[in-house]
Amino acid sequence: MSEFEQMFNDILDAPADSALAKEAKAKTTFSTLLTGMYTIQATGVEVEAGSEKSPWTDRPLFRVKSKATGANGKGFLSFDMSPVVYRTKTGRLDGPATLWGNVITAFNLESATNREVAEAVRQYPMDAYVEEVYNDGNGKWIKASNEQESKALAAKGYEARNFVRNLKAVQG
């Protein structure tokens, strides 16, 4: 066996470096944006069916990926929109249908096709109200209203997510 082969075998038989794993996890953890208003520009819009993990299984969704910039920072957001209306238990439009309706209103697209609405999302920047929320592990989502709340919830080990709640035409 060559020296290189022996070194390779020694590496394979050595215990894994847990410190390396922790450092790598910290570098690859996606940070969320703080709750607030952001100007977003779509970097991609894809049509897909809701997955089995989604609350909207088999529903056609427009998955929007975007860059976001606001007073609380900048980053990337992904969110779902849909022209197919689903309602909550209380009868209100659900999130994806609400966002689709927001775009129609923002760009005066009441007479447009769904293709034209999707093109507007791709083409024009929008202002988005984004919430940073944390899952407590028991199905409860807790909104972080400021950086202090965000840090406190993160310190508890709760999973952070961003949800786009509202879209409108860029003001100003």
Image (cartoon, grey):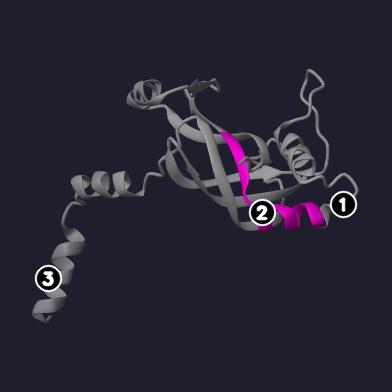
Q: Is residue 14 left or right of residue 104?
A: left
Instruction: Determine the CA span between mark 3 and mark 2.
Output: 56 Å
- Residue 34 point in image, percent of width and height: 45, 32
The residue wearing badge 3 is: 7
Q: Which mark is residue 124?
A: 2
For the point 51% across and 20% down, which residue is it?
A: 142
- Residue 37 point in image, percent of width and height: 54, 34
Secondary element at tag 2: loop
- Residue 91 point in image, percent of width and height: 82, 21
Q: Is residue 85 above or below residue 50?
A: above
For the residue pair 8 and 42, the one nearer the viewer reads as 42
Amino acid type shown at disc 2: Tyr
Badge 3 crowding class, 10 Å Cα cut-off, few under 14, some 14 to 19, many 20 or more, is few
For the residue pair 67 and 161, the one nearer the viewer reads as 67
For the point 87% across and 44% down, which residue is it?
A: 110
- Give the mark nearer the N terminus: 1 vs 3: 3
Q: Is residue 8 above or below residue 171?
A: below
Q: Residue furthest left?
A: 3
Q: Is residue 84 among the parts visible in the rendering?
A: yes
The residue wearing badge 1 is: 112
Q: Which residues are magenta?
A: 116-129
Secondary element at tag 3: helix
For the residue pair 82 and 124, the one nearer the viewer reads as 124
Q: Residue furthest right?
A: 111
